[in-house]
Image: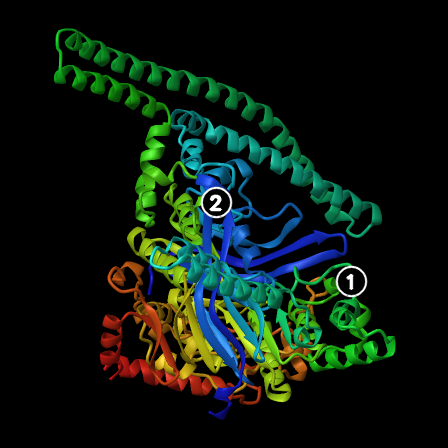
């Protein structure tokens, strides 16, 4: 299928601190996102799908804790990246479209400003270059500080161990080692600080020089044109005035993204996402847009920075069928044109079938089934996937719907065994005692259910789904004929 | 179909305009612009359309949460609400009509005025017995329940308003109705926030059921619920129809659900009803271009089908109504469509 792995999530575990205790929102989620593919994550509200995506974006709520796990993007672990550096990734590399277009736009800010805001803030070219020049020195210093902190923690733990007499000789050795390392770091820190100052100064000089040279160059050009301007008239005069204007604008653009440049780009992108008459639309407020148009604006904002990973968090839940269909088409088109990798979060299985190359089904903070769209829809193996599929009517279903009894578990007290066991009519004794691991069904398809264990009794999927899959495969084979 | 003779609800030329501003700022939003339909005993009538097409306004106008601008609503043969805007306009027309003599004018105007008075009186009249027969289930189960009232108070409110005073009877009825919707009697003393979304919607349904209605307007009862809960509520509504024989008007925008649940479906577009027929017929023979566009946008849980699905775009300017205005006509028994005579001929051809 698709090419390289773009994003690798491994054993991600997230909990939230609340007054009642720790809410375990995500409990060990692992998946890969390949280049140019759409991975859909399906699940009920509270299953942890939004939390996962927000963590990838680095916008986890303040009381959220990443207990464990890695998110590898371009060789970097996003869970360990500091806020300063995350600014360069968030938006620029990984973009996000939010659920509710009503609340994700500022109601008292003109659309134009909202679309260009990101570009202008990110587009300070000279400042960015200046920062890049001493970036290495800064990260070294930060790293040393972090090391010092962790060493201190380690040392304290060792001292405690020695006091209680847990490990006698070993503890002493460890303590010595820690002390030595700490001393080394302590020496290194002032040196790093000095280096940072020197680098900063050098960077300032270099950038200033560059800016001065550019300024001089442009001033010279402008004065040349002005000389010509003095002895010309009519149309030629206007052309010269325009040229001066352009030169000055280019000079500004050398320094940063100007308002004019951002507006031009905004119009381009708004055109791309299918907003008619973008020039007029730029000057309007969000309330003057319909729901579908508003969602297009949100998509345009996400695209201004040309990300290569796009996270869509239920982008069509607030929209009705026709508009939903348009937005999905738009996302698909953009994905093809820009070779985006998309993580698509939703609870609507119909939408998933349209969008996804691969599907992950989440329940109670865990991925319970992961496979290609065809795997999950034509050969579902997890009882929760069965339940989801059979609880929604399609255009041909007549029989009574099989509702999932009960409600999802309270994640303050995560169940010991399989989280779905309580609501599952196929649950076995072991489901209440132990969590099932991921069993492989095929190369692309895996699911976490004890039913796939070689010792488990053979269980067939419910009649309703079996029938529906037969019907679907028949229909599609007819179509292909 | 022998029940064809006794419509539970008839809507005739119903219009609901919302006006705001004065003078040059005056803005009239035609939320519902002249719709006609009948709902028969024991059926589920689905109303579908995109957001803002007036389906919720239709439901709210029928249950008299709005007073209609024009048109009439009949419930069990009795006129429960009617608008007078049309009469005002015809009075104006008569006044400016130069073919009529002054006497004829005053006579006609007097007639119209009595009619107008009658309509207003009908709209104002409060008939508790009749009122009890119609109930509504609202969209958002969180917003529609008062957080400071216990479930018992919420559910019993309708009963109290309709004149029941004895606590014993109220308690008994509340417990009964809670059981009908799958809740337990001990839930009666709790507050809405203690329930999950699906259970809250059940409370909303219990509140509607307690006065033993014959007709329920369900305004998107499941769109605010989680997938796994949606099926529970649909099953519940289905059971109510089967066991209690309640007639339901089901407003939704999810076509698969509406197809599954309704006997007949009306498709609305910008305040007009564009097509009305049985659900089988609608999905087999969609005639109006808007219906086709709507059906082509339904996502199904079938990836191979989805990858090939082509959405049909609908552009209202494809109709040429400059010469002849469209009418809501019956193209074949039970299948109504909004079109003019030229389009009718074309649709008839397509039907064959």
- Callout 1: few (<14), some (14-19), or many (20+) C-alpha neighbours within 10 Å? some
| Quadrant where the N terminus of chain A is found in the figure | bottom left
Label 1 sits on residue: B149
Quick check: B52 left or right of A246? right
x%, y% of residue A228?
15, 10
Residue at left offset 52%, top offset 58%? A10
Residue at left offset 53%, top offset 89%? A458
- Mark 2 falls within which chain? A
Residue A218 visible: yes
Between B197 and A437, which is closer to the camera in this rendering?
B197
Spatial CA distance of label 2 from label 1 is 34 Å
Q: Is residue A22 above or below residue A189?
A: below
Residue A381 visible: no
Residue at left offset 48%, top offset 57%? B88
Which residue sits furthest bottom?
A: B2
Checking the image for residue A195, the label placed there is none
Look at the numbered disc 2 and give the secondary structure of its residue.
helix
x%, y% of residue A34?
39, 59
Residue at left offset 25%, top offset 80%? B348
Label 2 sits on residue: A287
Look at the numbered disc 1 and give the secondary structure of its residue.
loop
């Amino acid at each position: 299928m698709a090419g390289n792995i773009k994003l690798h999530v491994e054993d991600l575990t997230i909990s939230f601190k609340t007054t009642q205790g720790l809410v375990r929102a995500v409990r060990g989620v692992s998946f890969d996102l390949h280049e140019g593919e759409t991975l859909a994550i399906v699940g009920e509200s509270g299953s942890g799908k939004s939390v996962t995506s927000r963590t990838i974006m680095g916008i986890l709520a303040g009381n959220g804790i990443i207990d464990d796990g890695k998110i590898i993007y371009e060789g970097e672990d996003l869970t360990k990246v500091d806020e300063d550096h995350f600014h360069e990734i968030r938006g620029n590399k990984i973009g996000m479209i939010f659920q509710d277009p009503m609340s994700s736009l500022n109601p008292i800010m003109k659309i134009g400003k909202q679309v260009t805001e990101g570009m202008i803030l990110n587009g300070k070219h000279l400042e960015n270059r200046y920062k890049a020049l001493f970036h290495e020195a800064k990260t070294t210093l930060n790293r040393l500080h972090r090391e010092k902190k962790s060493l201190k923690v380690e040392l304290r733990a060792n001292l405690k161990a020695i006091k209680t007499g847990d490990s006698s000789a070993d503890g002493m050795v460890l303590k010595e080692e820690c002390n030595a390392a700490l001393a080394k770091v302590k020496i290194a820190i002032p040196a790093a600080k000095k280096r940072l100052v020197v680098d900063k100064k050098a960077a300032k000089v270099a950038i200033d020089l560059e800016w001065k040279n550019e300024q001089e160059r442009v001033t010279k050009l402008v004065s040349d044109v002005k000389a010509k301007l003095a002895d010309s008239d009519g149309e030629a005069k206007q052309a010269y005035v325009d040229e001066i204007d352009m030169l000055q604008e280019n000079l500004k653009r050398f320094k940063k993204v100007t308002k004019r440049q951002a507006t031009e780009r905004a119009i381009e992108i708004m055109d791309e996402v299918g907003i008619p008459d973008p020039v007029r639309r730029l000057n309007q407020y969000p309330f003057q847009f319909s729901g579908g148009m508003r969602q297009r604006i949100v998509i345009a904002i996400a695209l201004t920075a040309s990300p290569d990973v796009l996270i869509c968090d239920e982008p069509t839940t607030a929209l009705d069928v026709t508009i939903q269909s348009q937005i999905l088409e738009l996302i698909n088109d953009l994905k093809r044109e820009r070779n985006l990798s998309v993580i698509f979060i939703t609870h609507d299985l119909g939408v998933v079938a349209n969008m996804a190359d691969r599907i992950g089904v989440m329940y109670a903070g865990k991925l319970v089934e992961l496979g290609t769209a065809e795997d999950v829809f034509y050969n579902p193996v997890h009882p929760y996937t069965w339940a989801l599929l059979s609880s929604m009517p399609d255009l041909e279903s007549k029989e009574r719907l099989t509702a999932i009894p009960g409600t999802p578990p309270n994640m303050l007290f995560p169940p010991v065994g399989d989280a779905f066991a309580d609501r599952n009519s196929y649950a076995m004794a072991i489901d209440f005692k132990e969590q099932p691991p991921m069993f492989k069904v095929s190369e692309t398809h895996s699911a976490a259910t004890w039913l796939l264990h070689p010792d488990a009794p053979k269980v067939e999927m419910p009649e309703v789904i079996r029938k529906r899959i037969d019907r679907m495969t028949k229909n599609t084979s007819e179509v292909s004929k | 179909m022998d029940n064809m003779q006794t419509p539970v609800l008839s809507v005739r030329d119903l219009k609901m305009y919302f006006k705001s501003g004065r003078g040059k700022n005056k803005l009239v939003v035609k939320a519902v612009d002249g719709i006609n339909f009948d709902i028969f005993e024991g059926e589920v009538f689905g109303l579908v359309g995109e957001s803002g097409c007036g389906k919720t306004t239709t439901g709210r106008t029928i249950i008299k949460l709005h007073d209609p601008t024009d048109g009439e609503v009949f419930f069990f043969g009795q006129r429960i609400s009617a608008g007078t805007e049309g009469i005002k306009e015809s009075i104006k027309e008569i006044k400016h009509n130069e073919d009529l003599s002054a006497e004829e004018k005053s006579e006609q105007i007097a007639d119209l005025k009595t009619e107008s008075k009658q309509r207003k009186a009908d709209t104002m009249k409060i008939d508790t017995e009749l009122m009890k027969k119609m109930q509504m289930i609202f969209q958002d189960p969180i917003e529609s329940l008062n957080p400071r009232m216990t479930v018992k108070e919420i559910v019993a409110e309708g009963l109290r308003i309709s004149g029941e005073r004895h606590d014993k009877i109220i308690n008994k009825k509340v417990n009964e109705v809670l059981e009908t919707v799958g809740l337990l009697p001990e839930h009666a003393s709790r507050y809405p926030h203690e329930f999950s979304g699906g259970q809250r919607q059940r409370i909303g349904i219990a509140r509607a059921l307690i006065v033993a209605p014959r007709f329920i307007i369900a305004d998107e009862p499941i769109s605010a619920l989680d997938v796994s809960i949606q099926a529970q509520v649909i099953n519940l509504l289905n059971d109510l129809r089967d066991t209690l024989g309640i007639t339901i008007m089901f407003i939704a925008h999810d076509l698969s659900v509406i197809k599954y649940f309704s006997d007949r479906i009306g498709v609305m577009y910008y305040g007009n009803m564009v097509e009305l027929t049985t659900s089988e017929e609608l999905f087999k023979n969609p005639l109006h271009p808007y219906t086709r566009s709507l059906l082509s946008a339904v996502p199904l849980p079938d990836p191979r089908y989805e990858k090939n699905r082509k959405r049909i775009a609908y552009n209202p300017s494809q109709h040429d109504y400059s010469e002849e205005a469209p009418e809501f006509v019956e193209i074949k028994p039970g299948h109504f469509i909004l079109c003019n005579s030229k389009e009718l001929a074309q649709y008839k051809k397509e039907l064959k």
